[in-house]
Amino acid sequence: MARFFIFLTAFWMALAFVATAQTSYLSAQWPNTDFSNTTVDLSEIRSGGPGKDGIPAVDDPTFLKVSDERRIGPREPVMTVEIKGQRPRAYPIRYFMVHEIVNDVVGGTPIAVTFCPLCNSGVVFDRRIAGRTLSFGVSGNLRNSDMVMYDRQTESWWQQAVGEGIVGQLAGRSLKQIPSWMESWETYKDRNPDGLVLNAPRKNFNYGSNPYVKYDTAARPFLYDGALPPNGVDPMARVIRVGNRAWSMERLRREKTIREHGVELSWQGEQASALDSRKIGKGRSVGAVRVRNGQGSDIVHDVMFAFAFHAFHPRGTWH
């Protein structure tokens, strides 16, 4: 029994040493981040390769009229934001493969349009919180294979898939999500001939390439060591997340319309996967969805990989 307690004491001391070392390393890299305030275990955070701002967010986006855009293929995916009283805006995923975050303002509402390729998670947030407007950058870190963002005002860290502060002064706070959806460029421009589309953030840059060739048919997600989904669900299957519930995109493909638990999921045709072929516009076909409530209003949702849903909603409900 004495040996057991000696072992247990040594074990916890080792863990404490590792945690201290991790905090010291991160503090050296991020001197303005308050690592005394966290909602997650820092050992869950790992480098994704590029350092702070190694993936450059877009801070001064410019837009084109739909009729002036000639570079985007008809099946290429775009993230769509339609705020009442404002011209619809499309944010082509080709640009997020390079930038991952666009800080924008739509009708006086400051928003962050975000896409994490490793989780296929595309979410739009209101950038206002705690009486201030934040702007976001890419930290270069990952947790559960998902992008960790940071705000430039407090250098707090934020989990992209759920919009929650996890480290720093604003840890524990949550960003308000704004309804958005992913669809093909052709679908967007046919519905919104007077709409806007994000212009290429960099001139003469080779946008439209996918650095994650065949990623969404890989056997396992990149840099992920968490639990896999239950019941044999393919970890790379696309699921439609609404709150803590998930519906299979393949089920929607079969049924076209699903009405359950106060929401309506409607099939919106095909679009190219951004995470399949080298050229995004030539990616294999994957479905698009629109999610509305019982009154017909668009509601917040995400189409993410199944492993990411399970990682961030371990007690979520699978449909």
Image (tube, helix red, strand yellow):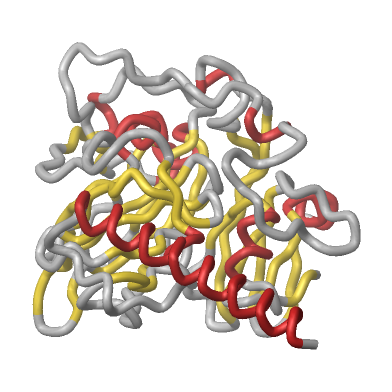
| View extreme (right): residue | 231
Instruction: Give percent across and percent down for residue 277.
Output: 60, 19
Q: Quadrant of the N terminus?
A: bottom right
Res 54 quadrant in image: top left
Q: In which quarter of the image is the C terminus?
A: bottom right
User: What residue is rendered at 49% in x and 29% in y?
Assistant: 76
User: What residue is rendered at 53% in x and 82% in y?
Assistant: 295
Comparing 180 with 176, the one in front is: 176
Instruction: Give percent across and percent down for residue 20.
Output: 37, 66
Please give left or right for residue 187 compared with residue 311 in the image. left
Res 313 quadrant in image: bottom right
Res 178 quadrant in image: bottom left
User: What residue is rendered at 72% in x and 32% in y?
Assistant: 218
Please give left or right for residue 254 compared with residue 285 in the image. right
User: What residue is rendered at 59% in x and 72% in y?
Assistant: 10
How many numbered markers are drawn?
0
Comparing 157 with 92, the one in front is: 157
Q: Is residue 167 visible?
A: yes
Q: Can residue 298 be seen in this view?
A: no
Comparing 27 with 127, the one in front is: 27
- Compared to residue 169, the image places residue 184 above or below, namely above
- Compared to residue 156, the image places residue 254 above or below, namely above
Instruction: Give percent across and percent down for residue 182.
Output: 49, 48
Instruction: Give percent across and percent down for residue 90.
Output: 34, 43
Comparing 301 with 192, the one in front is: 301
| View extreme (bottom): residue | 1
- Compared to residue 157, the image places residue 315 above or below, namely below
Please give left or right for residue 304 compared with residue 256 in the image. left
